[in-house]
C-alpha cells in the first residue's frame, strides 16, 4: 500500500501521529528541497529516521524544517537500524525545537559537509577569538567538515553550527563546500520498493466520492415528490483525516 500527499495540507507532526495511531508498519518518506528523508515505524512506533548522513533526532529535525514537501507512506518496509528511543511527544517537541534553531542558521550553513577555512594565520586570529570558541578554533584543520568536527569534539551539530556562524559573522573563517552540485530529488529513496499498489492519496479519496449529478431534462420534467414524503437525508461525507486512517489500516 502506498499513500501520497503534501506537507502543507497534512503537517508532518499530524502525519506521524496518524501513523502511530493506526499502529501500522512501514515508512513515511518526505521529499522536499535537497535529499529525501525516511521515517520508519513498526506497529505504530517511530524507531528510526534518516536523511543522507543524518540519523535519529538530527534527521527528524531536518524533515521538520521543510515547509514545502510531499510525502508517501509505504507499508511493510522496515530497517534494521534504530536511532530513536523514548516517547513520541519527546521526539516531536525536541525535533521541532531543533528545526526552529536550524532555520536561523541555514543562510550560513545549508548542510554540515562544509569545511571551515581560517581567514588569516592562527596566530593572527587567536587574540580575536572568544574564550567560548577556543576549543572549536583549535580543532579547525582546514580539512575536516563541520559534521566531522562535531563528532571529534562530541558537540551537538546545532551547537557547533551556531558557534561556527558566529565566527563567520566575526570575519574569522569562511566555509567551503565539499558537495557536488545539487541533483534532482529522486521519486523514491534507493533500496525501497513499494510492496503493493500505488496512487495519489487525494486521487484515491476523490475516487471514493462520486461527483454530484446534474439533473437531466427528464428528471427536471418529472413530477415532484408528494409533500407528505420526508426528503431523504444526504449522506455525510467522510473527512480526509478519516479516509487517511482507513487507508493506512488497509
Image (cartoon, grey):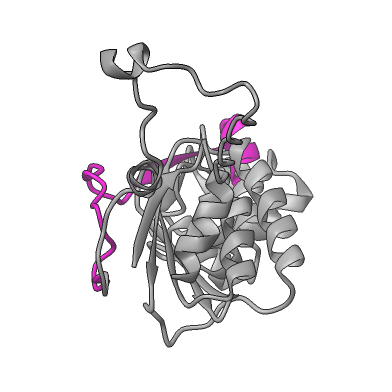
Magenta stretch holds residue 191 = yes
- Residue at 28% across, 63% down: 189
Q: Is residue 142 left or right of residue 152?
A: left
Q: Between residue 125 and residue 35, name the one nearer to us.
A: 35
Screen quadrant of the C terminus: bottom left
Q: Is residue 54 visible?
A: no
- Residue at 59% across, 41% down: 236
Numbered range of the magenta stretch: 164-193
Spot occupied by residue 151 in the image (x, y as percentages of width and height): 55, 70
Q: Using the image, determine if residue 218 lies above or below residue 188.
A: above
Q: Between residue 39 and residue 241, name the one nearer to us.
A: 241
Spot occupied by residue 246 in the image (x, y as percentages of width and height): 51, 62
Spot occupied by residue 233 in the image (x, y as percentages of width and height): 61, 36
Residue 223, image quadrant: top left
Screen quadrant of the N terminus: bottom left
- Residue at 40% across, 81% down: 78
Q: Between residue 53 and residue 42, name the one nearer to us.
A: 42
Residue 87, image quadrant: bottom right
Q: How many numbered marks appear?
A: 0
Q: Is residue 37 left or right of residue 158?
A: left
Q: Using the image, determine if residue 134 lies above or below residue 239.
A: below
Magenta stretch holds residue 83 = no
Amino acid at each position: 500500500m502506498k499513500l501520497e500527499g503534501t506537507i502543507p495540507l497534512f503537517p508532518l507532526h499530524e502525519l506521524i501521529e496518524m501513523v502511530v495511531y493506526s499502529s501500522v508498519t512501514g515508512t513515511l518518506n518526505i521529499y522536499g528541497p535537497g535529499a529525501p528523508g525516511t521515517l520508519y515505524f513498526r506497529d505504530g512506533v517511530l524507531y528510526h529516521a534518516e536523511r543522507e548522513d543524518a540519523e535519529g533526532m538530527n534527521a527528524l529535525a531536518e524533515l521538520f524544517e521543510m515547509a514545502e514537501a510531499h510525502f508517501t507512506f509505504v507499508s511493510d518496509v522496515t530497517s534494521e537500524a534504530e536511532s530513536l528511543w523514548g516517547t513520541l511527544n519527546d521526539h516531536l517537541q525536541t525535533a521541532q525545537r531543533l528545526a526552529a534553531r536550524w532555520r536561523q542558521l541555514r543562510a550560513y550553513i545549508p548542510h554540515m559537509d562544509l569545511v571551515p577555512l581560517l581567514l588569516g594565520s592562527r596566530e593572527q586570529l587567536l587574540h580575536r577569538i572568544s574564550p567560548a570558541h577556543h576549543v572549536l578554533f583549535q580543532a579547525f584543520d582546514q580539512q575536516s567538515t563541520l559534521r566531522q568536527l562535531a563528532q571529534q569534539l562530541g558537540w551537538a551539530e546545532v551547537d557547533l553550527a551556531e558557534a561556527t556562524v558566529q565566527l563567520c559573522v566575526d570575519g574569522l573563517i569562511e566555509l567551503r563546500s565539499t558537495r557536488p552540485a545539487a541533483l534532482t530529488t529522486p521519486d523514491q529513496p534507493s533500496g525501497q520498493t513499494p510492496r503493493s499498489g500505488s496512487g495519489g492519496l487525494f486521487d484515491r479519496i476523490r475516487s471514493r466520492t462520486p461527483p454530484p449529478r446534474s439533473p437531466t431534462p427528464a428528471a427536471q420534467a418529472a413530477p415532484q415528490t408528494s409533500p407528505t414524503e420526508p426528503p431523504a437525508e444526504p449522506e455525510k461525507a467522510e473527512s480526509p483525516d478519516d479516509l487517511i486512517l482507513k487507508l493506512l489500516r488497509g
